[in-house]
């Protein structure tokens, strides 16, 4: 009940809404619909950026508003406003009523209740003073420059947000959540003999700032950014052609997220536009490949106590030992597909309707030691970190750029390479997994996923993997 008490204070006690009258308006607007809800949101966010030895920007924003959704059959009516008053809710109700008709006329069952808490309620923005956050960025700058004389530029940023939501259904059920989120990023540019290279690293999660103000945490972040930049100074042109590729643990799971995860979201499969459509229960990956989406990991960036429709989050098995077992579902697509919601209905803000989205998506560990996987490769690439990529959901084709990769020669890691790209097909890559490491890691807490113009925080992860016969694009 803590979250309901907190959000009641924001939206009703101090806000411009009366709970009983809002409930009545929501009930009237959604009468005869298949589903729908009023989504109330209050968010505070701040960010600090430091560059060239000084604070370049500091921002603070507060926003609040609501989104009212009505679902009838496959049709969705959605209206939103940044003003929290009953007149605006009433106008929104008249707007969404336009989709009434072509429905069962029976409101879908409400989500089950839960008292589980995966992160603290505390608003990180109000705990640490402004001066401490600015001082942290200055210390990062000085530390990075003091660590290596080749450092010629340091960029650091710190950001945090606190989001409070409450979801009201026509049947009177109310669900609430309070979500903190913090992220620290460091980027370092080094120069040697006229050559400049950069490296970056970030950490984050649903926690307060205290963890990142600790020298042990921020110094490790600087060291990792500097390590990547120095490695890049020694990089040689990447080879090209089809070869064995070893993917490192942790952040390389972003390839899994993009090339495979989106294709397992319910909307793409209901519309049969996914490369996985119609393959439920069939083998889609090599034996040993198990992929889950787990929103229940404490303090993780992609975790949610409940999704943005009020459904409790869960761990959903997508692929088990190579067999397709499940899709990620919001309420609308689950109902139309005759399935159960999985707690993956997410939205960027009150101005967006919920759609199926990933949370923390990762591959489970296998039996092999990472060093044995490397030793098994005679000629290939070891890809440790990734930058941007492009994916076609329908075909599964992808192109990803490696920000840190190395040659593998005779079972040993060799020189770092630059400008390597991985080119392939997501479902096909799953079938080419030859060895799975015993070292599953999650990313450090930096992922943001974009879909249909909406960005939401996510997590990715995987163990060390050997993929046989992946196309590498390079300049060497």
Image (cartoon, rainbow, N blue to C red):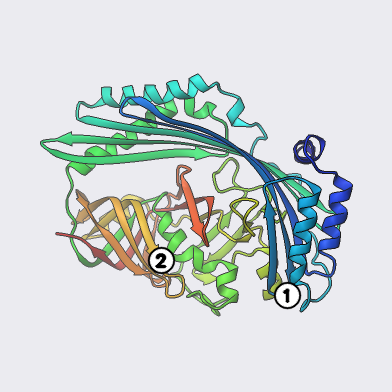
Is the residue 313 above or below the residue 72 in the image?
above
* Residue 392 visible (yes or no): yes
Q: Position of residue 208 (x, y in %)?
A: 57, 31
Q: Position of residue 236 (x, y in %)?
A: 15, 50
Is the residue 219 above or below the residue 338 in the image?
above
Q: CA distance from mark 2 to mark 1?
A: 30 Å
Q: Nearer the viewer, residue 290 or 165?
A: 165
Q: Earlier in the sequence, mark 2 or mark 1?
A: 1
Q: Quadrant of the N terminus?
A: top right
Q: Is residue 6 left or right of residue 228?
A: right
In this rendering, the count of numbered labels is: 2
Q: Is residue 149 left or right of residue 358?
A: left
- The crowd level at tag 2 (other Cα within 10 Å; few <14, some 14-19, many 20+) is many
- Residue name at image x 55 percent, y 43 percent: 300
Is the residue 356 above or below the residue 324 in the image?
above
- Residue name at image x 28 percent, y 54 percent: 382
Name the quadrant containing residue 422.
bottom left
Residue beneath disc 2: 391
Q: Position of residue 340 (x, y in %)?
A: 70, 67
Name the quadrant containing residue 203.
top left
Q: Quadrant of the C terminus?
A: bottom left
Q: Secondary structure at mark 1?
A: loop
Q: Position of residue 329 (x, y in %)?
A: 63, 65
Residue beneath disc 1: 73
- The crowd level at tag 1 (other Cα within 10 Å; few <14, some 14-19, many 20+) is some
């Amino acid at each position: 009940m803590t979250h309901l008490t907190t959000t009641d204070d924001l939206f009703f006690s101090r806000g411009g809404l009366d709970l009983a009258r809002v409930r009545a308006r929501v009930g009237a607007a959604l009468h005869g619909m298949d589903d729908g809800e009023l989504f109330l949101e209050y968010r505070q966010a701040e960010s600090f950026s430091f560059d060239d030895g000084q604070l370049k920007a500091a921002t603070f924003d507060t926003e609040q508003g609501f989104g009212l959704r009505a679902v009838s059959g496959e049709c969705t009516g959605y209206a939103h406003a940044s003003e929290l008053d009953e007149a605006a809710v009433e106008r929104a109700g008249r707007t969404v009523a336009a989709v009434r008709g072509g429905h069962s006329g029976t409101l879908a069952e409400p989500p089950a209740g839960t008292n589980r808490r995966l992160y603290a309620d505390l608003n990180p923005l109000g705990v640490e003073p402004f001066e401490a956050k600015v001082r942290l960025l200055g210390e990062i700058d000085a530390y990075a420059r003091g660590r290596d004389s080749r450092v010629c530029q340091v960029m650091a940023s710190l950001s945090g947000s606190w989001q409070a939501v409450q979801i009201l259904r026509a049947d009177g059920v109310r669900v609430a959540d309070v979500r903190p989120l913090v992220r620290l990023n460091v980027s370092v540019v080094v120069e040697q003999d006229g050559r400049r290279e950069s490296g970056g690293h970030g950490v984050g999660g649903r926690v307060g700032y205290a963890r990142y103000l600790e020298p042990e945490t921020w110094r490790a972040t600087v060291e990792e950014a500097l390590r990547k930049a120095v490695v890049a100074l020694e990089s040689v042109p990447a080879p090209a052609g089809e070869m064995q590729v070893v993917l490192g643990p942790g952040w390389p799971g972003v390839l899994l997220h993009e090339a495979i995860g989106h294709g397992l979201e319910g909307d793409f499969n209901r519309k049969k536009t996914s490369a996985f459509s119609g393959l439920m229960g069939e083998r889609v990956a090599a034996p040993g490949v198990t992929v889950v989406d787990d929103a229940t990991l404490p303090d993780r960036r992609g975790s949610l106590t409940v999704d943005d429709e009020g459904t409790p989050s869960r761990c959903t098995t997508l692929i088990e030992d190579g067999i397709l077992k499940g899709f990620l579902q919001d309420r609308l697509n689950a109902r139309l597909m005759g399935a159960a919601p999985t707690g993956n209905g997410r939205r960027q803000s009150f101005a967006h309707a919920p759609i199926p989205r990933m949370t923390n998506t990762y591959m489970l560990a296998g039996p092999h030691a990472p060093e044995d996987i490397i030793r098994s490769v005679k000629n290939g690439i070891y890809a440790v970190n990734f930058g941007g990529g492009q994916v076609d959901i329908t075909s599964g084709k992808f192109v990803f750029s490696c920000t840190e990769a190395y040659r593998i020669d005779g079972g040993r890691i060799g020189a770092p390479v630059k400008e390597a790209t991985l080119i392939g097909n997501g479902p096909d890559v799953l079938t080419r997994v030859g060895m799975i490491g015993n070292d599953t890691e999650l990313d450090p807490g930096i992922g943001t996923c974009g879909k249909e113009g909406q960005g939401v925080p996510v997590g990715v992860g995987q163990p060390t993997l050997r993929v046989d016969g992946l196309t590498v694009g390079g300049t060497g």
